[in-house]
Image (tube, rainbow, N blue to C red):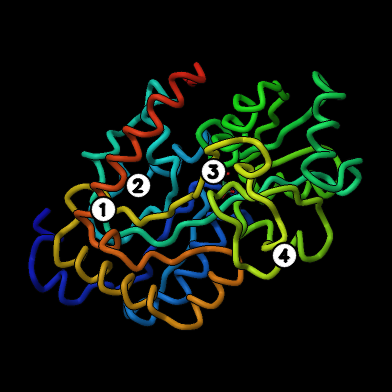
């Protein structure tokens, strides 16, 4: 602790590359947010930021690695809503979400889209609904593991529709997207940061967005919401934040938070995020205390939903 407590330590930080741990496979939406943010943030931070993908168990393996890492500012977690769902889903979770991390700030909120394989014989939500009812028991829904955003959205979709589907878990929706495009699975609920280019390129069928209101993004604005398509109240948006191990020195956290805030105001970053349907956080949740309060509220929101679905992992 002496090593990292001195003011001189924080003064010089960072003196070597900072690792952003991404708890899903490369190529997925979490990875895309991390690489874009790292590219934008490294100038303001004054040092290299490298990405390390630590996939598995719905993002909890990566979060565990950071919770147990040295609190020296060189191992940072970039994670999403799984931080709020894993406490209810994983009964042997190796960390306490609100106690074992320092909160650095919230990054963005990303809508989701319901997409299908290009060969799926349904070209809009009404035709999809008919296909789902005609193919009960034969539908494969891809996700990124228990607790992933794609799992959560799929869970809500199945339980609202009352149609059970076989879920096929991947290390991330990057690899899952490859199989969906290849026709190995039928459907997936995935973040627009991963689906917008595929939808624009006609690589997948797009049926709806999961937000309360339609999106303004040119490639997505034609898609109806699930709410207007009949799933009243359906509203899922995936948020991403930055976390450090508990005990990371405050001056180091302040440097990380300041660099994050600078990055979130970068015009190019904002343009890239907007083109993929993502909304960069501009409110007080970019501050650690409000970031933490928000996650606590999300834990309390998702807990009952998950318990009602009766899903958990040991
Ligand atoms: C998720 O479904 O949680 C994410 O899309 C996984 C990923 O980022 O690959």
Q: Residues within 10 Å of mark 2 (few under 14, many from 20)?
A: many
Identify the mark nearer the N-term, 4 or 2. 2
Dot 1 crowding, Cα within 10 Å, few <14, some 14–19, many 20+: many
Locate residue 76, reporting x and y percent: 35, 56
- The residue carrying mark 4 is 197
Q: Secondary structure at mark 2?
A: helix
Q: Confirm or deny contact between disc 3 and disc 1 (CB under 8 A).
A: no
**Residue at point 55% right, 47% down?**
24
First in sequence: mark 1 vs mark 4: 1
Mark 2 — residue?
66
Query: Is 175 situated left or right of 183 in this image?
Result: left
Q: Which residue is mark 1?
A: 103
Which of pointers 4 and 2 indicates the residue nearer the eye? 4
Q: Earlier in the sequence, mark 1 or mark 2?
A: 2
Judge: label 3 CB < 8 Å from ligand 1: yes
Residue 130 in percent (x, y) is at: 84, 31
Query: Distance between the Cα atoms at labels 4 and 2?
Result: 31 Å
The answer to whether residue 307 is above or below residue 35 is above
């Amino acid at each position: 602790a002496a090593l990292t407590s001195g003011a001189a330590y924080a003064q010089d930080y960072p003196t070597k590359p900072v690792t952003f741990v991404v708890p899903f496979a490369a190529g997925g939406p979490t990875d895309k947010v991390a690489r874009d943010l790292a590219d934008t943030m490294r100038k303001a931070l004054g040092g290299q930021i490298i990405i390390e993908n630590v996939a598995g168990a719905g993002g909890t393996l990566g979060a565990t690695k950071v919770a147990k890492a040295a609190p020296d500012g060189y191992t940072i977690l970039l994670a999403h809503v799984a931080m709020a769902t894993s406490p209810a889903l994983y009964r042997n979770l190796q960390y306490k979400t609100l106690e074992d991390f320092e909160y650095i700030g919230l990054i963005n909120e990303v809508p989701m889209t319901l997409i299908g394989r290009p060969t799926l014989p349904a070209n809009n939500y009404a035709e999809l609904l008919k296909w789902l009812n005609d193919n009960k028991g034969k539908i494969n829904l891809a996700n990124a593991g228990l607790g992933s955003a794609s799992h959560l959205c799929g869970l809500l979709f199945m339980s609202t529709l009352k149609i059970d589907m076989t879920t096929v878990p991947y290390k991330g929706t990057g690899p899952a997207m490859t199989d969906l495009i290849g026709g190995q699975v039928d459907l997936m609920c995935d973040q627009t940061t991963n689906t917008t280019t595929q939808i624009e390129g006609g690589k997948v069928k797009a049926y709806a967005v999961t937000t309360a209101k339609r999106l303004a993004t040119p490639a997505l604005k034609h898609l109806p919401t699930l709410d207007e398509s009949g799933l009243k109240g359906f509203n899922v948006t995936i948020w991403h934040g930055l976390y450090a191990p508990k005990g990371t020195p405050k001056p180091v956290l302040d440097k990380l938070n300041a660099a994050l805030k600078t990055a979130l105001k970068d015009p190019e970053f904002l343009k890239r995020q907007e083109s993929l349907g993502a909304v960069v956080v501009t409110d007080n949740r970019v501050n650690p205390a409000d970031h933490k309060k928000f996650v606590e509220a999300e834990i309390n929101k998702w807990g009952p939903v998950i318990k009602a679905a009766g899903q958990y992992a040991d």
